[in-house]
Image (spheres, rainbow, N blue to C red):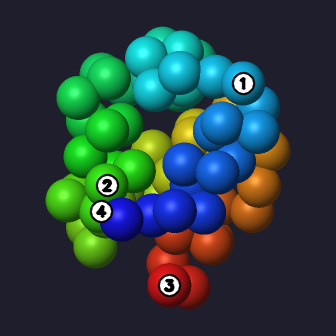
Amino acid sequence: MREWLKHLREAAELSQDEVAKQAGISQSYYAAIETGERGDKLPVPTAKKIADVLRFDWQQFYSE
């Protein structure tokens, strides 16, 4: 579970669906990223899109 990602999303007062739409990905894919099911092979462009929406350094995905 990526608690830090969930915390950032909740602090931004966004739902998983809202983040996903703004990042151009499906809600189910975003949910899998947030729970850690899809993270070890997260493509850099996807990481950057999510980071842009939630305003954090995209490299945080790879420094866990």
Looking at the image, is mark 2 or mark 3 earlier in the sequence?
Answer: 2
Q: CA distance from mark 1 to mark 4?
A: 21 Å
N-terminal-most mark, 4 or 3:
4
Q: Identify the amino acid type marked 3.
A: Glu
Counting every numbered tag in the picture gives 4
Query: Would you name the residue on which mark 2 appears?
Result: 35
Residue wearing tag 4: 36
Q: Quadrant of residue 10?
A: top right
Residue assigned mark 1: 13
Marks 3 and 1, the one that precedes in the sequence = 1
Mark closer to the chain start, 1 or 4: 1
Residue at 64%, 22% in the rendered image: 14
**Image quarter hosting the N terminus:** bottom left
* First of labels 2, 1 by sequence position: 1
Mark 3: few/some/many CA within 10 Å (<14, 14-19, 20+):
few
**Label 1 amino acid?**
Glu
Q: Please, is residue 28 above or below residue 63 in the view?
A: above
Q: Are marks 1 and 4 in contact (CB under 8 Å)?
A: no
Q: Real-space Cα distance between discs 3 and 1?
A: 24 Å
* Residue bearing the label numbered 3: 64
Residue 19 on image: x %, y %: 55, 25
Question: Residue 30, image x and y in percent?
Answer: 36, 37
Q: How far apart are the alpha carbons under marks 4 and 2?
A: 4 Å
Left or right relative to 10: residue 23: left
Residue beneath the point at 31% across and 55% down: 35
| In the image, farthest residue toward the bottom | 63
Q: CA distance from mark 2 to mark 1?
A: 18 Å
Answer yes or no: is residue 35 visible.
yes
Which amino acid, by three-letter code, is at mark 4?
Answer: Gly
Residue 11 left/right relative to 32: right
Task: From the viewer's side, name the closer residue of 51 and 8.
Answer: 8
Mark 4 and mark 3: span between their CA atoms? Answer: 11 Å
